[in-house]
Amino acid sequence: MTTLTIAWIALPLMAGLMAYLLPRLARGLVIGVAIVSIAYGLTLILLQTSFPINLLDSYGVTLMADPLSGFFILTNGLVTAAVMLYCWGSDRSAFFFSQLCILHGSVNSAFLCADFISLYVALEVISIAVFLLIAYPRSNRSIWVGLRYLFVSNTVMLFYLIGAVLVYQANLSFAFSGLAQASPDAQALILLGLLTKGGVFVSGLWLPLTHSEAEVPVSAILSGVAIKAGIFPLVRCALMIDSIDPVVRLFGLGTVFLGISFALFEKDVKRIFAFSTISQMGFVLAAPPLAGFYALGHGLAKSALFLTAGSLPSRNLDDLRQTPMATPAWAAISMGGLSLAGMPLLIGFAAKTLTLKSLLPWQVIGMNTAAIGSVIVFARLICLPHQPQSEKKLAPGFWPAIGLLGVALIAANVFSIETYSLATMGKALGIIALGWLVYFGMIRRVTLLLPRTLELFEQLIGFMSLVLIGLFWLALA
């Protein structure tokens, strides 16, 4: 299995190079890599075993393959396959597909890392690949957004690297487990880097502009998969170290409410999806034992939502109320939104049910309230008018991509069929009904424009400083 894993990690990087050198094979190579990742992720989940791969024993440089990794890898494979189907008939160059393949492989590597130095390398490669994909249109706007992302990412990764060195100084090892014996300085610096990369709480406010301004398939891959490269190590550390678990859960709770608060009053559809991503990352962190399964549900639903955004006549909600969207696009938005709201028969129901059952007592009221908020966010979109034909035609790759994600949203229930009972379905439907009542009775009539000041470039650095101070306080406590 060790040899197979090493070969699987290297495959996307080699395929990415071949895609650039042999342009005619680019699409097939990326699809093939995604299929292999789907198979590998399913294998880890079904075997229900874990095995370490020691790369440098004396330095604690280790990979860990287990069911948690399997769910994240499966998400990466399915989302990448859907994005490729969406882009199959486009005129994008081999360079685009090459970078997509390299990003896929780098994210897979991050989902296996069990030490801070190999994770650092994976995250840095991810940052470069994401920048190149964001800037692919070569417009002034796309280049600025890409550089903005790269600057924020590189800044926090410098803090992270200092923290990784301090962990090694304390343990003579880079292993995640060494964070427990490291100084508060090391814990705060590493957590700042991972929280920012994962789009968590105020240090993740770089995400809405980045995800909303990128091309539709790039937004789908960023929100569905790439952002989870920062979430995964937080979850892994929370599961390994008791003192990290409550910190991660606390930031999860705060992140849920931050994302929902902005999404409730945003009028740009892609920005609503982006703020929803922030809130959903909070759900992933709120219950680390269920993080992998929830990440799978979120990745499938959110990539479907972003891919659908390319087939809407407008991104503005006011315009969409006057110009109905095509019924297939509305159906895709409803499917993704209802899954994230926890509708039975979709994976979001099982993921949200299990997550809400795994909360600590101090989380229960807040997270259940947040679940209602998620329903309200997507009620705003599901209530939009639609008709069989629209002014904006469906994107050429819409049907195969949404078809794959729709089947996966239903089929993934097989991993948690035991969650279906009258009590759990009744609670889920009750939350959805309550959310719709609040929407029609209150939120629908409220018009509130939230300032975007908090997302300004200079504000992001200030927020990272505030989060760092808070992390120092938590680590000392």
Image (cartoon, rainbow, N blue to C red):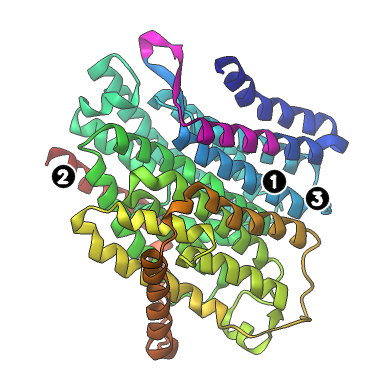
Residue 401 x, y percent position in the rendering: 72, 56
3 or 2: tag closer to the N-terminus: 3
Question: Residue most toward the right?
Answer: 24
Q: What separation in Å lies between label 1 and label 3 (alpha carbons)? A: 10 Å
- The CA distance from mark 2 to mark 1 is 43 Å
Tell me the residue at 37%/58% (across/down).
459
The secondary structure type at the circle numbered 3 is loop
Main SS of residues in magenta:
helix
Kindly identify the residue that appears in the image at 30 percent across and 30 percent down: 163
Identify the image quadrant of residue 468.
top left
Q: Residues within 10 Å of mark 3 (few under 14, many from 20)?
A: some
Q: Is residue 412 visible?
A: yes
Q: Is residue 124 visible?
A: no
* Residue of label 2: 473
Packing grade of label 2 (10 A; few <14, some 14-19, many >=20) is few
Q: Quadrant of the N terminus?
A: top right
Q: Position of residue 280 (x, y in %)?
A: 43, 58
Number of labels in the image equals 3
In this picture, is 399 found above or below 408? below
* Residue type at tag 3: Trp
Q: Decide if residue 24 is on the left or right side of residue 256.
A: right
Is 311 rendered above or below residue 96? below
Residue that numbered label 3 is attached to: 88
Q: Is residue 451 left or right of residue 125?
A: left
- Which residue is located at x 46 percent, y 65 percent? 342
Residue type at mark 2?
Answer: Trp
Q: In front of the other: label 3 or label 2?
A: 3
Q: Which residues are magenta?
A: 34-59
